[in-house]
Image (cartoon, helix red, strand yellow):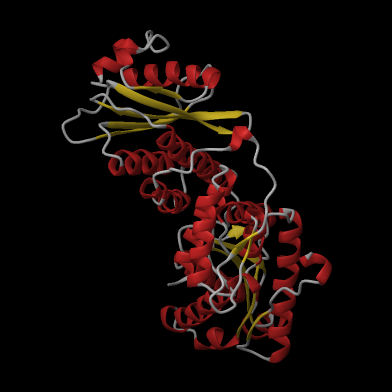
Amino acid sequence: MGAGTLQDLMLQAEILVQYGMRNKALERLQRIQQLFPHEEEQNPELRQLYLTAGMTPQYAAGAAPAPVPAAPTPAAAIVSETLDMTSFARVPDITRKLNHQNTAESVLKTAATEIGTQWNLARCIAALRKPGSRATSFQDFAAAGNEPAPREVIESVVGMIQDLAISQGALASSDVMSSHELRDVAPQLASLGVRSLLALPLSDGTDQLGILILADRGSRNWAANDVLVFKMIAEQVAIALNNAGLRRLVKNLSVTDENSGLLKRASYLDLLMGEVRRATQQSTPVSVMLMRFGDRAALIKEQGEAAADAAMQRLGQLVAANIRQNDLAFRYAANAIAIVLGETAEKEALMVVEKMRRLISTALDDKHAADALNAGVAEAVMRQQFDPVDIVTEVVNRAEHALEKAVAEGAGKSVAIAAVLTAAAVA
């Protein structure tokens, strides 16, 4: 069992707590306690999750985990504890796939395809649309035997159903032809072969982003617990769309250095803030890695400024081409590169340093630069109760301190500095 299993179980428990299903949440937390004993002692997110759920892990021989009395849950938040856990268990996997997407179009396609395939639907439509406007983008999953829908029909269906969902909330119908509220859009749905339908608005707070439409050719009853699972997925789609929008904004603002392919330093804090917010929502780690390639003044004296700049451009191109799709690489200084590593803890970040060192030595045939590389690594302290601004400030300062320490230890050294939390901070 690894970190991925722990993160999946934690995400499931968090969602169950959020929706008032405490008994189911405790089952997941007890499973975590069995598989990862004492993990909460070094994992502040898990410790907070135990506290929120009202459970205190116990490890005495033969003792079962003892739930702590929890505050009464508001009636509106209580959902039946008979949730189909088979369906629910799919949520973390779909969430992970959504968060790996870099564009709104790929988020919509992933959502429509995963939902349509995993729940054996005839059709699933995921669309971006502002109220009162035409859909700016949509993806239509059609199962085998179903023809792709004409664009004008999709746009009409999306517009009318989203307007209804915004005013009435989630729409569920086992027979659209007999539904009074869907009477105006029934002819278009019939042309698509749709008999039963579930529609969920995609929203970010009060901002309406679009609509998620699940449809089938036969009569399909949408049980309350099924609707709950799809609402969870719709929330994750909205989060992924926001993350993809931030990445698209970066490209549109042309903040990439055209010579090296690295992002400019000016966008560093904003993008790191976005990654921290995403990681906080998903309970995943984020690490910052700073790489320094020798003394700039000494390089200029030895090779000349033009040669030193050309060397950094080659290094930047190599780094940009060899990071993962969702990682972010920046021209941090004249002789330094920063990488924001999503879903990466300190240990894995140090492995990335050595990967880069090997690449520089082999791909660029520059053993001198590889041997001179100093790196500082810091893993962000991810806690729901911490302000993202404070998280970013602390990890940036710690990464710089780690790099300074690595440089002081000599060429080729790498240093990782863990966060030191005071008793007040822990409390």
Using the image as rendered, state which of residue 6 and residue 59 is in the foreground: 59
Residue at image location 69% in from the left, 72% down from the top: 399
Residue at image location 32% in from the left, 18% down from the top: 153
Depicted 268 relative to depicted 86: above or below: below
**Quadrant that contains the C terminus:** bottom right
Please tell me in which quadrant of the rendered image residue 120 appears.
top left
Q: Is residue 261 visible?
A: no
Looking at the image, residue 21 sits to the left or right of residue 82; the answer is: right
Residue farthest to the left, as pictured: 145
Q: Position of residue 334 (x, y in %)?
A: 67, 70
Please tell me in which quadrant of the rendered image residue 147 appears.
top left
Depicted 297 relative to depicted 8: above or below: below
Q: Is residue 268 visible?
A: yes
Please tell me in which quadrant of the rendered image residue 341 appears.
bottom right
Using the image as rendered, state which of residue 244 and residue 160 is in the foreground: 160
Looking at the image, residue 83 sits to the left or right of residue 275; the answer is: left
Residue farthest to the right, as pictured: 424
Q: Position of residue 67 (x, y in %)?
A: 62, 59
Using the image as rendered, state which of residue 314 and residue 406 is in the foreground: 406
Depicted 221 relative to depicted 39: above or below: above
